[in-house]
Image (tube, rainbow, N blue to C red):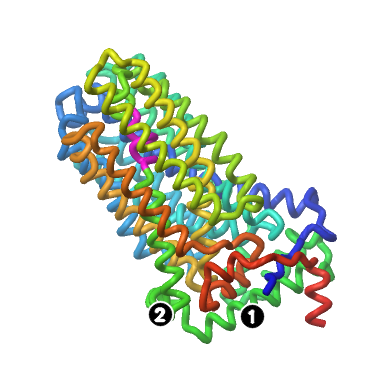
């Protein structure tokens, strides 16, 4: 049986004042992803600075102090995990904007703690506070983006959101490279400037949140139906009360909230109640671990370590190459965002995972040849190039969908809590990577890459049998997929395109 896909283009002016205001709102939310990318890119490479090591452990090489290095890196994820138990409250009760404001204030407070101390324990506390704030913004911002965006570009807006990771990573890499030229054991400015710039992104979000509207779906859930309607009229309906998208979306939201109220899906236990919700939660689990253990953590977050394996030994070389990696990541993540509706979510994730599994096999072979014979510099360089191809494929496929796909598959009343669970799982995997994998890389060096060959092959099999296609569905109608006995088959059924006017005529 064919699935109806709604064409929203009719009667919509995408250059109206209201639409430009929505573009601005999505732009502000976008900076929350940049916050995350900046921090993760900064610390792992900042630890290679002599000034940072001298300040906090009294020795220029902080990375060799595995215990302190691992703890300082992992504490950000610990803060995020603790924050996950509060983000459901902030996002559901304070609103999506309220959660972004709260998170931004916490991140700025954490940065102030980091800059005001030469004591490692206080610095670690600052990173914990930042982690607590980061999870507030990275849970609420993608949800906000998808809920306020016009249905015609909802997919692209949600996909572009996570590409902000590279918008944070690029300036991080450039600043680190610039500071590496003035780094010395006594020049604290070389590590303080990169740390302080993080507050700039949060400041933009904090100020911007006072100029953007609240999510209409959140307003509906609080019984503020008239405000939700005004949002749709102004921002989606070109200020026309009788615009077909207004009544259609209001009906969709009413029906979805009524169904969810009957199923008691507002509590955390609802994430594990019933076959449909268990299926969704299983996908959330898979998304969290498959996205984090693909190898991007090693290829982009620890460039000072990985680039050395390929024969690039100076800090300037390593940081310079990381700029190129970040720029390529941004370009290919933007391309991926443009193709989420053309290629489909499931196809991008499946074929992308298969492709970069092959890349890791090639990288492992090159590293073995080069490290057994250091004169084989050409093989080392080729291995590095293939690793960059991995990063491009990952950026094209997983980066745009890592935030969009979880938001889409969760029903509204479980969305904030489901995204909190997703962030909890992502940060739990981050702790394992930062705290445990560091020892694995130190112990096995390049041989550790074999893990990514095996894990990604496993991920491809799971994606093939379980991941559904959400392309073409409204947020409210995605329930149809999970209520079907065979969700994957249902999601891949043939599509029939109809206009919103036709759907309203059917209801009339």
Q: What quarter of the picture does the C terminus occupy?
A: bottom right
Camera-nearest residue between 337 and 422: 337
Q: Is residue 288 above or below residue 300?
A: below
Residue 273's disc number = 2
Residue at image mark 1: 255
Could you say whether the residue bearing mark 1 is in a helix, strand or loop?
helix
Q: CA distance from mark 2 to mark 1?
A: 20 Å
Q: Position of residue 447 (x, y in %)?
A: 24, 35
Mark in the foreground, 2 or 1: 2
Place residue 118 in its image quadrant: top left
Q: Position of residue 335 (x, y in %)?
A: 60, 40
Q: Residue at x 35, y 32 (%)?
A: 363
Q: Is residue 193 above or below residue 219?
A: above
Q: Residue at x 47, y 66 (%)?
A: 416
Camera-nearest residue between 52 and 457: 457
Q: Can residue 78 be seen?
A: yes
Q: How many marks?
A: 2
Q: Residue at x 49, y 60 (%)?
A: 406
Q: Residue at x 33, y 37 (%)?
A: 298
Q: Residues within 10 Å of mark 1 (few under 14, many from 20)?
A: few
Q: What quarter of the picture does the N terminus occupy?
A: bottom right
Indicate left or right for 482 with 309 as reference: right
Which secondary structure class fits the magenta region best? helix
Residue 496's disc number = none
Q: Position of residue 427 (x, y in %)?
A: 33, 53
Q: Residues within 10 Å of mark 2 (few under 14, many from 20)?
A: some
Could you say whether the residue bearing mark 2 is in a helix, strand or loop?
loop
Q: Position of residue 432 (x, y in %)?
A: 25, 49
What span is colored magenta in the figure?
295-303
Q: Are marks 2 and 1 in contact (CB under 8 Å)?
A: no
Whether 299 is among the magenta residues is yes
Q: Can residue 89 be seen?
A: no
């Amino acid at each position: 049986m064919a699935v109806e896909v709604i064409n929203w283009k009719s009667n919509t002016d995408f250059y109206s004042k209201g639409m430009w205001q929505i573009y601005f709102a999505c732009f502000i939310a976008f900076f929350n992803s940049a916050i995350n990318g900046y921090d993760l890119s900064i610390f792992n490479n900042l630890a290679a600075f002599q000034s940072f090591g001298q300040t906090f452990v009294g020795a220029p090489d902080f990375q060799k102090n595995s215990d302190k290095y691992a703890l300082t890196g992992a504490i950000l994820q610990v803060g995020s995990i603790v924050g996950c138990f509060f983000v459901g409250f902030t996002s559901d009760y304070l609103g999506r904007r309220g959660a972004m404001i709260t998170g931004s204030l916490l991140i700025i407070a954490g940065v102030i703690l980091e800059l005001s101390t030469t004591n490692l324990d206080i610095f670690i506390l600052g990173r914990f506070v930042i982690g607590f704030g980061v999870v507030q913004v990275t849970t609420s911002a993608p949800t906000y983006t998808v809920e306020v965006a016009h249905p015609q570009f909802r997919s692209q807006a949600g996909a572009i959101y996570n590409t902000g990771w590279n918008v944070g990573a690029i300036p991080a890499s450039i600043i680190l490279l610039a500071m590496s030229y003035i780094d010395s054991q006594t020049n604290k400015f070389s590590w303080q400037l990169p740390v302080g710039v993080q507050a700039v992104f949060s400041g933009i979000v904090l100020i911007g949140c006072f100029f953007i509207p609240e999510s209409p779906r959140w307003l509906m859930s609080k019984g503020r139906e008239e405000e939700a309607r005004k949002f749709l009229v102004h921002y989606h309906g070109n200020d026309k009360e009788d615009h077909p998208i207004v009544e259609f979306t209001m009906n969709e939201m009413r029906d979805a909230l009524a169904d969810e109220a009957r199923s008691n899906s507002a509590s955390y236990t609802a994430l594990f109640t019933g076959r449909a919700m268990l299926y969704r939660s299983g996908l959330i689990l898979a998304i969290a671990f498959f996205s984090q253990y693909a190898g991007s953590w090693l290829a982009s977050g620890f460039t000072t370590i990985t680039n050395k394996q390929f024969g690039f030994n100076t800090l300037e070389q390593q940081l310079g190459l990381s700029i190129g990696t970040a720029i390529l990541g941004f370009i290919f993540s933007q391309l991926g965002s443009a193709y989420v509706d053309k290629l489909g979510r499931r196809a991008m994730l499946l074929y992308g995972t298969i492709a970069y599994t092959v890349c890791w096999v090639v990288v492992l072979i090159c590293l073995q040849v080069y490290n057994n014979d250091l004169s084989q510099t050409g093989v080392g360089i080729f291995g590095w190039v293939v690793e960059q191809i991995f990063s491009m494929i990952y950026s094209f496929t997983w980066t745009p969908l890592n935030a969009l796909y979880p938001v889409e598959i969760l029903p509204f009343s479980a969305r904030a809590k489901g995204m909190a669970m997703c962030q909890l799982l992502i940060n739990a995997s981050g702790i394992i990577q930062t705290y445990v994998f560091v020892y694995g890389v130190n112990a096995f060096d390049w041989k550790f890459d074999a893990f990514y060959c095996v894990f990604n092959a496993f991920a491809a099999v799971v994606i093939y049998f379980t991941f559904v296609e959400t392309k073409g569905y409204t947020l409210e109608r995605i329930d149809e997929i999970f209520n079907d006995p065979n969700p994957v088959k249902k999601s891949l059924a043939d599509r029939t395109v109809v206009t919103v006017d036709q759907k309203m005529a059917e209801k009339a």
